[in-house]
Image: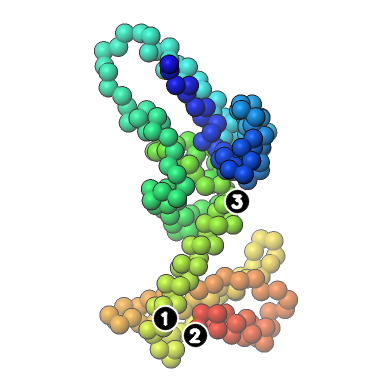
Amino acid sequence: MATRKRSTVWLYFDHIDQNPSKVKCQACGETVQHSGNTSNMLKHLKKKHPVESAEIEAKRKEDATASTSACRPTTSRQTTLHDCFSKAGRYPDESPKAKSLTSKLLKMIAVDLQPLSIVDDQGFREFAREMDPRYVLPSRRSLVRTDFPQLFQRAQSDVKSILTEVSDRDITLTTDLWTSRAGEAYMSLTCHYISKDWKFRSHILSTSHLPGEHTAHAIAEKLTTEAEEWGI
């Protein structure tokens, strides 16, 4: 007896062990009743996540075309890597490969100053899926609430560890005050020092909101607070 093919929609939902009749959307965290079929899941994606819904529809058409083509004679029995990867299923979220790809994604966003919304852009999602269909991009919500806060904590810990090896009197701090388009003031704090191998190093320690008047006293207080946070 042939095994029934699992719907692509399951790439976007997780089972809830405590409530088997419901599933959790990976993009927004909302729970959806599935009752043994995927109708409600598809409706949820179509209403709340049109990009993912379009991806599923495109995959459905691709599968239909492939099924039709399979009935025709072919001169090659070679399967593409993309097809092999698609059949292999998605990477588990905690797998080393998924973590590695997410880490590279975070680095790209940070280094290239990309907006977090890039993970919602249709073109980027299609590119990522073509590169590796087994990898599911994290949602913007996940980036904001989990991935980047964890990355910041790791980076902060690493920099603090480095700065403990540098004497306070050998560290120079510089600040940059600027105003956003919305008229809100911010202060960026950067530290500079000469490393043990005689190389000039700099680390941007923070960019924080600076409310109220920008008096010398207010800036000094903010600078002191930030320096204490970094153990300088």
Q: Is mark 2 on a helix, strand or loop?
A: loop
Gap between marks 3 and 2 measured at Cα: 33 Å
On screen, residue 57 above or below 73: below
**Contact (Cβ within 8 Å) of mark 2 with mark 1:** yes
**Contact (Cβ within 8 Å) of mark 3 with mark 2:** no
230 left or right of 2? right
Where is residue 213 shown, x and y percent of the image? 72, 78
Say few, some or many: other residues with alpha carbon within 10 Å of mark 2 (under 14 / 14 to 19 / 20 or more).
some
In depth, the one of 169 and 25 nearer the eye is: 25
Gap between marks 2 and 1 measured at Cα: 8 Å
Give the mark nearer the N terminus: 3 vs 2. Answer: 3
On screen, residue 112 above or below 217: above
Residue drawn at (61%, 71%), measured in percent from left and top? 208
Residue type marked 3: Arg
In depth, the one of 143 and 127 nearer the eye is: 143
Where is residue 210 shown, x and y percent of the image? 66, 74
**Residue annotated with mark 3:** 141
Say few, some or many: other residues with alpha carbon within 10 Å of mark 3 (under 14 / 14 to 19 / 20 or more).
some
Checking the image for residue 232, the label placed there is: 2
Residue drawn at (47%, 35%), measured in percent from left and top? 126
